[in-house]
Image (tube, rainbow, N blue to C red):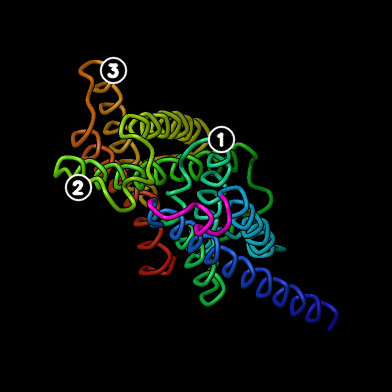
Amino acid sequence: MLLSAIETAKHMIQTLTGTIALVLYSVSGLLLARRLFHDRTKPEKTSGLNKLQIISIGLMAVVFHAITLYNTLFVAGGLNLGFFNALSLITWLIALLVLLAALSNPVESLGVFLLPLASIAISLELIFPSTFMLPGIQALELKLHIIMSVLAYSLLSIAAVQSVLLAVQDKHLRNKRPGGFIRALPPLQTMETLLFQLIGLGLAMLTLSLISGGVYLEDMFAQHLVHKTILSMTAWVVFAVLLWGRWKFGWRGRIAIRWTLSGFFVLLLAYIGSKWVVEIMLGR
């Protein structure tokens, strides 16, 4: 009876904090969109809350999201990394990284596209509870491998969105139509610099993830891991070649965008695609 009451209370807290996070993410995303698409020819006072205030709302959403994740990830049997829980964890980390980076870098425009994803992930987590247990006795090294994998995917996801914005900005400038929200974005060179910084950090974490997997997993090429391993290695090669091309030949613009999106697509198949197939389609 007591256990049932505790579980009910835990579920109520999870629903409440998740709903609050969802609303705050939506509000901060809308405010960032209004700021991004705001006509810069109008007086600044019409643009509403300033950047720091909007980011603060987003960070409040991150805090409530973290509370929700705590209740869904850390359960009696160990760590629950079910599909929708893992998706929520990734979007939480993406939101946290973007908002913290926006405090000192001009990357708040990424929040317009990434914060709504966190809202969607929370909704799915609450509506479709999923279970994929990692027992509490699992080695610390394996948990560190998972953390590095999630961090790598999060950083390279942000880089993918950055590359899409860069592509839109490049197209407008080539067509000599720099109006609209394009004027609210940082200069093209700054956008490219941010993109390669994100890719560099993401590749470093992906490298550590692959190394730790090779050292601590019993068999990275076991039947249930082989697709993820091969796709992750392929993505590593794509991003490594891109950084080499940037250093050696000065790759930028459309070349950089194509390589970034190609690498992200492969990584998407490795992390989300393989997990979807194993847990949702095959029910393992």
Q: Which mark is residue 177?
A: 2
Crowd around label 3: few <14 · some 14–19 · many ≥20 (10 Å): few
Residue mark closest to the camera, 2 vs 1:
2
Q: Amino acid at mark 3?
A: Trp
Residue 45 among magenta residues: yes
Quadrant for the C terminus in the image? bottom left
The mark closer to the camera, 1 or 3, is 1
In the foreground, 148 or 13: 13
On whether residue 18 falls in the magenta region, the answer is: no
Q: Is residue 126 visible?
A: yes
- Crowd tier of the residue under label 2, counting other residues whose Cα lies within 10 Å: few below 14, some 14–19, many 20 or above: few
Question: Which x, y percent locates residue 103?
Answer: 58, 40
Residue 44, placed above or below residue 277: above
Q: Image point 49% across, 65% down: which residue?
A: 121
What span is in magenta? 41-50
The residue that disc 1 covers is 104
Q: Residue drawn 52% across and 66% down?
A: 26
Instruction: Using the rendered view, name the quadrant where residue 97 is placed.
Output: top right
**Amino acid at circle 2:** Arg
